[in-house]
Amino acid sequence: MQTWQMQTAKARFSELVEHAARQGPQEITLHGRSVAVLVSRELFDRLCGSEQSLVDFMRASPLAGHDDIVFERNRDLPREISL
């Protein structure tokens, strides 16, 4: 991961964005301390899992459309606790 000082990142923002898209995450520092990381949109979407909605994920499940599935439930009583 390449590191950019804040003042350099501001002055060369277009280059910073291009580096993030081609080379991966870019770290930004302020007074020698890491304060931010710039990532490409593709990586951000992959990390957030926002490529597919939950509804689409459930519809793509191998179990979608199977109405005959029975989920067993534990019918035991809850444990005794003393308060």
Image (spheres, helix red, strand yellow):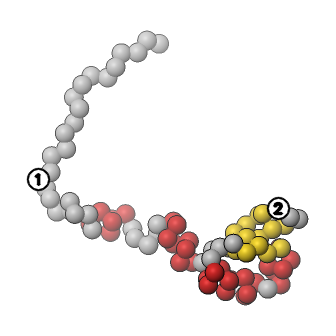
Name the residue at 49% across, 70% down. 46
Name the residue at 81% across, 80% down. 10
Name the residue at 55% across, 74% down. 43
Amino acid identity at mark 2: Arg
- For mark 2, give the secondary structure: strand
- Choose between 32 and 49: the one closer to the eye: 32
Question: Where is 71 relative to 21, above or below?
Answer: above
Position of 53 with respect to 21 (left or right) is left
Question: Farthest top residue?
Answer: 82
Task: Name the residue that disc number 2 marks.
Answer: 33
The quadrant of the picture occupied by the N terminus is: bottom right
Choose top left, top right, bottom left or bottom right for residue 54.
bottom left
Amino acid identity at mark 1: Asp
Q: Position of residue 33 (x, y in %)?
A: 82, 62
Choose top left, top right, bottom left or bottom right for residue 55.
bottom left
Position of 35 with respect to 80 (left or right) is right
- Choose between 44 and 65: the one closer to the eye: 44
Position of 76 with respect to 67 (left or right) is right
Question: Farthest left residue?
Answer: 68
Q: Position of residue 16 (x, y in %)?
A: 72, 82
Point out the frontmost of discs 2 and 1.
2
Task: Name the residue that disc number 1 marks.
Answer: 68
Q: CA distance from mark 2 to mark 1?
A: 57 Å
Question: Where is 1 relative to 23, above or below?
Answer: above
